[in-house]
């Protein structure tokens, strides 16, 4: 834009601001929609990204996104925070992920040199098809998809004696985490799948009204945990007790070169590691008998 030298700098700044406000936001380009047994699935392109959401609403939360020109690079801060689970164990071999979305996390985990198997549990076959068709997700010899309820899978795996080095909880519907995947009983079942030093990473919300209850529930099952807070909150803990801070930093350095390629920034993540208790002392633990997430999580 050409600016006359006689025009007031204040007026120039004001004119630019008005132009920016008036400029229309880049519209979503709908790529695919379908109504599955569980939800409405919408795939759309916007601002150089392809995203998935479980509602047609404009302000609906995005379940998954990838950069169209660099699909391996992690878009969301929470996915980077989930990958910080490697700071507790830099070489997991057997990994379980509850919740597929576009397949971002399973794909990143399968590309780790140490990984021998990634089991992904997704209740909705339509999400699996969409992830493969529109997000390049590719099950194979290392990545296996189980289309069933996450808790059912965990119970069956527990009965069969299956063990994992890393479990990631990332299952959401259009509102929040399904309530049967929030309880003390469920987390105890998940803990039973972890090896001696198995790591758990759980994606939750920082601003949820369930925050205090979730925190109390995780503490009741796992004891102390690392609490990483940004827009989302990621809980990181380990069955054999938390590694000390110096071990976290050594592990972070060990995996830094691999994770930097997918957009994980070590220094930023390390600054989020905290074990400080920031929830109410009297918060009630969520159980199979008391898990009214639909009421507690009303904004």
Image: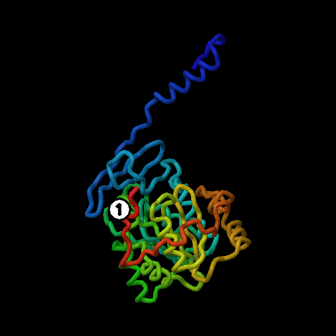
Label 1, on which residue?
Answer: 127
Position of residue 206 measured from the top left corner of the image (x, y, whole percent): 51, 59
Residue 28 position (above or below residue 287): above
* Residue 63 occupies quadrant: bottom left
* Residue 197 occupies quadrant: bottom right
Position of residue 211 measured from the top left corner of the image (x, y, whole percent): 49, 65
Residue 75 position (above or below residue 155): above
* Residue 11 occupies quadrant: top right
- The quadrant the C terminus occupies is bottom left
Viewed as shown, does residue 145 lie left or right of 234? left
In the foreground, 61 or 225: 225
Q: Residue at x 63, y 68 (%)?
A: 276
SS category of the residue bearing label 1: helix
Q: Residues within 10 Å of mark 1 (few under 14, many from 20)?
A: many
Q: Number of numbered discs present? A: 1
Position of residue 50 measured from the top left corner of the image (x, y, whole percent): 43, 49
Q: Residue at x 70, y 75 (%)?
A: 244
Can residue 283 be seen?
A: yes
* Residue at the extreme top of the image, as rendered: 6
Position of residue 155 measured from the top left corner of the image (x, y, whole percent): 39, 83
């Amino acid at each position: 834009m050409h600016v006359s030298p006689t025009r007031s700098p204040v007026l120039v700044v004001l004119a630019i601001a008005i132009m920016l406000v008036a400029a229309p936001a880049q519209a979503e380009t709908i790529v695919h929609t379908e109504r599955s047994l569980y939800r409405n699935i919408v795939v759309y392109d916007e601002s150089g990204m392809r995203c998935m959401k479980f509602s047609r609403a404009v302000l609906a939360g995005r379940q998954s996104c990838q950069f169209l020109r660099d699909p391996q690079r992690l878009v969301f801060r929470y996915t980077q925070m989930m990958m910080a689970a490697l700071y507790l164990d830099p070489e997991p071999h057997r990994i379980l992920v509850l919740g597929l979305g576009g397949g971002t996390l399973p794909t990143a985990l399968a590309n780790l040199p140490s990984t021998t198997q990634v089991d992904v549990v997704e209740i909705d076959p339509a999400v699996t098809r969409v992830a493969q068709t529109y997000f390049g997700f590719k099950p194979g010899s290392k990545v296996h998809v189980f289309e069933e309820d996450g808790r059912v899978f965990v119970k069956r795996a527990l009965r069969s004696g299956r063990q994992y080095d890393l479990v990631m909880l990332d299952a959401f519907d259009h509102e929040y985490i399904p309530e049967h995947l929030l309880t003390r009983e469920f987390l105890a079942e998940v803990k039973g799948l972890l090896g001696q030093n198995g790591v758990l990473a759980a994606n939750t919300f920082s601003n949820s009204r369930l925050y205090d209850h979730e925190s109390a529930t995780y503490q009741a099952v796992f004891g102390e945990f690392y609490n990483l807070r940004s827009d989302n909150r990621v809980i990181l803990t380990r069955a054999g007790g938390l590694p000390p801070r110096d071990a976290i930093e050594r592990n972070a350095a060990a995996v830094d070169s691999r994770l930097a390629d997918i957009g994980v920034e070590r220094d930023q993540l390390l600054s989020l590691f905290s074990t400080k208790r920031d929830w109410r002392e009297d918060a009630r633990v969520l159980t199979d008998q008391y898990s009214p997430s639909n009421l507690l999580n009303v904004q």
